[in-house]
Image (cartoon, rainbow, N blue to C red):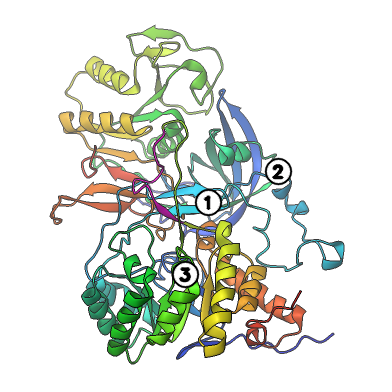
Amino acid sequence: MVTESVNVQRDTSPPQRLDLTLVERRQAGRDYVRLVLDAPAAWESLPGQFLNVLCESDPRAAVGSERRTLALDEGGEWPLATGLELGRRKWPFVRRPLSVSRVLRSGVNVRLEMLVRQVGSGTRFLAARPPGTPIDVVGPLGNHFTLPGDDRLCILVGGGCGVAPIFGLADWLVERGRACVLIVGAPAFEELPVVFRETPPATGDAVAPCSGFADPDIDVETILSTDDGSAGFHGTAIEAVRRRLKDMGDDRPIALYGCGPERMMRALAHLAERRGAPCQVSLECFMGCGIGVCLSCARKMRDPASEKGWTYRLTCQDGPVVDTHDAVWE
Amino acid sequence: MSTPEIDLSVAVGRIAMKNPIATASGCAGYGEELARFYDPSILGAIVTKSITREAREGHPPPRLAEVRAGMLNAIGLANVGLEAFLNEKLPALAACDVPVIVNVAGSTREEYLEVCAALDATPGVAGIELNVSCPNVKEGGIEFGLDPNILSRLVQDVRAKVSRATLIVKLSPNITDIAVTARAAVDAGAEALSLINTLRGMAIDPWTGRPVLTNVIGGVSGPAIKPVALYMVRRVWEEVAGPREIPIIGLGGIQFAEDAVEFIRAGATAVAVGTANFVDQLAAPKLLEGLREALGRLGCSSPLQLVGAIVPC
């Protein structure tokens, strides 16, 4: 089941609510952790899809064995078997949508890697879960990146925690024999969600492939960029892309892929527009439900049929991956 | 101790529900979204997203924010519009073995009347829930929901157009005494009441100073509002619904089976689960199972035995 024809696209699993066991937790640079979850053998997801993850603020509430309901005579809560699992989950309230970063298969084992940036109460809680803990997820949700129509060079751009789906996309494209260049940007060296074997050199205004990734173990030409020049190219990831394209010459057709802050995605969209290159980006958005019910993750997308020329589409269902030519960039 | 045979069925107006658990408007879409997680026919009823005559895009995002123990939303009644609802959404929903209650919002009396008449003429619609309480859309009907005289006239006019479907009026909590509007609605012909809609609220980013929602004001939902909702159900039950034998669909922050029991004890015949669906897509089936267990524990054979039943202090 591991080998398959390059051109066959598997269908993805239907979204389900699952308790996936956290099997590994690794620090990934100063601000990030990588969580590895054990997934069912039948798991199928494609790069760009996400999990909607339940977070809790009370660490005691997360351990399965401690999720015991007290009997009435113990002075506890009403000992109903059902409905109570959420009883102590008071805050944060809604789930956190997080990309599946990589899908790792070995034999029948399927493991999902997630990259978590510790920003708020939910992600901090999640990042602190000890291995062995069940993580309550709904997924796989959303759409996914697609292959370019021909064998053009794929340039993958990830900014900050936006590199999460980009790593998995690189795996997927390489598996399908596509040529890729990966560009990973961050404000400064210590903010890169990567573990290095040795400190990568600062290369100023030159873009040079960086070797020495220890984690993730991705075997693709990778260029680092930092806004402050502390590692790799000195400048934004988009400037690094432009530089790489200039070095390469303009003749080779490319496909652009990206995930990162809105400003970066907008810049990538403009670059794609100017170059006439196809470009898909994964958008980040706060979500109430992740399944198309709450209608909160609305995003303006071009719609020639509408009077205004645009319409709202749901990031959770019609995204998170969008063609930049279809999106409205404000 | 032997478990008594439990019959969960209840009736709200002419709607026969297999059990008292419904999904709340705006929290179950058009049914198809939750159908990916469980069979909607296990529910007592499905209440749809608000339907307006024309399709609505909704407010510019951000439309939703997390607040302590709940959520704040200003979606802006985004919906596909009456025609698309009837043609594209309702058929699949009506094919499920579950009563469909369509929530209706409008900006004018004419709009309410037109949409309600069309729905009443559609066999797949078991009930019409008048949304006269959306807190975050100027034209979302709240001006119909706060003044008892205006509400009364609207309900009377709608009543004249609705003969087959059960007419439910959804009340706003953004009022001094909810019994006043409850009475107005019932006097004008409402066959059931649902309460409460969201409470008006806001959230501000302390560092940028910007309100979190583009619309500034939104509706608060989730466990944060449960005590308020419970009180209002009790108030309406004591003042209006109990004496007049008008069923109440109670909602507001219901998450657990115990919450459902509380609402039933306060006076609700049925309950609706809203925001909890977002956190746990299986909230409704879990509630259903938990309610059965709770009734068994209380030695009740039907939830109806508990309606309004609180013990004096």
Query: Does B296 appear above or below A216?
Result: below
Q: Which residue is mark 2?
A: A59
Image coordinates of residue A322 in percent, x first then y, are: 30, 44
**Which chain's residue wears label 3?**
B
Q: Which mark is residue B24?
A: 3
Q: Which residue is mark 1?
A: A94
Residue B100 in view, yes or no:
no
Q: Amino acid at mark 1?
A: Val
Rendered residue at 38%/75% (across/down): B148
Q: Amino acid at mark 3?
A: Ala
Residue B114 included in the magenta stretch of the image:
no
Image coordinates of residue B296 in percent, x first then y, are: 74, 81
How many other residues sit within 10 Å of disc 1, few (<14), some (14-19) or many (≥20)?
many
Query: Does A202 appear above or below A271?
Result: above
Which of the two residues, B57 or A315, is positioned nearer the viewer here?
B57
Image coordinates of residue A40 in percent, x first then y, are: 58, 54
**Which chain's residue wears label 2?**
A
Residue B210 included in the magenta stretch of the image:
yes
Residue B157 in view, yes or no:
yes
Query: Does A229 appear above or below B287?
Result: above
Report the span colored magenta: B209-219
Q: CA distance from mark 3 to mark 2?
A: 31 Å
Q: Amino acid at mark 2?
A: Pro
